[in-house]
Image (cartoon, helix red, strand yellow):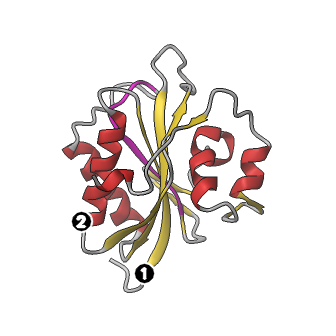
Amino acid sequence: MSGRNSAAWLSLGGNLGDPAKSMAAALRILDADDRTRVVAVSSLYRTPPWGKTDQPDFLNAAAQLDTRLSPRDLLELCLEAEHRLKRIRAERWGPRLIDIDILLFEDMAVHEPGLEIPHPRLTERAFVLAPLAEIAPSLDIDGLSASERLAILETAGIERLPSEPDWWKA
């Protein structure tokens, strides 16, 4: 665990069961850890599948955390939350109950087995950038803001859903 607080941004998604309920539960698990606090959560977004397209639409969201954890320890906490919510890793880009990815951690670059920060496909994925740009429009992502990055991607099929501001706390 690092000694100071750091900002981290996550992407959450799922397309099996009740994805909104799973994402809310995951955020509550992360927030319950005394070393991590959820400080901002986007609306929910309905998005078409990416990579493997013969599956149901996803729900996606983004969250900003304030954490005293290292990037590796935050990854372990995210994986623990997925495990507690019964995530099974069966197929790359396939259907899932819950998926939590660390997008950015301060301005750090991390290249370790199983952990790449910034997320290696962050700038290619409108389904990640749309909710991220909602909560952090001016966040720098490799020289452009989250909003600028989103503006250059195809966003067809991405729909921001009406969401209460604290939808995840219920």
* Residue 5 coordinates in the image, percent (x, y): 42, 81
Does the segment drawn in magenta span residue 103? yes
What is the magenta range? 94-104
Element type at mark 1: loop
Which of the image's four quarters has the N terminus? bottom left
* Residue 18 coordinates in the image, percent (x, y): 31, 31
Left or right, residue 162 beside residue 38: right
Left or right, residue 144 beside residue 97: right
Q: Which residue is mark 1?
A: 5
Residue 121, compared with residue 67, is above or below; it is: above
* Residue 149 coordinates in the image, percent (x, y): 74, 50
Q: Which residue is mark 2?
A: 32
Alpha carbon of mark 1 to alpha carbon of mark 2: how far? Answer: 16 Å
Q: Residue at x 58, y 53 (%)?
A: 132
Element type at mark 2: helix
CA neighbours of label 2 inside 10 A, class few (<14), some (14 to 19), many (20+): few
* Residue 120 coordinates in the image, percent (x, y): 60, 48
Left or right, residue 4 beside residue 132: left
Q: Tell me the kind of residue under disc 2.
A: Ala
Q: Tell me the kind of residue under disc 1.
A: Asn
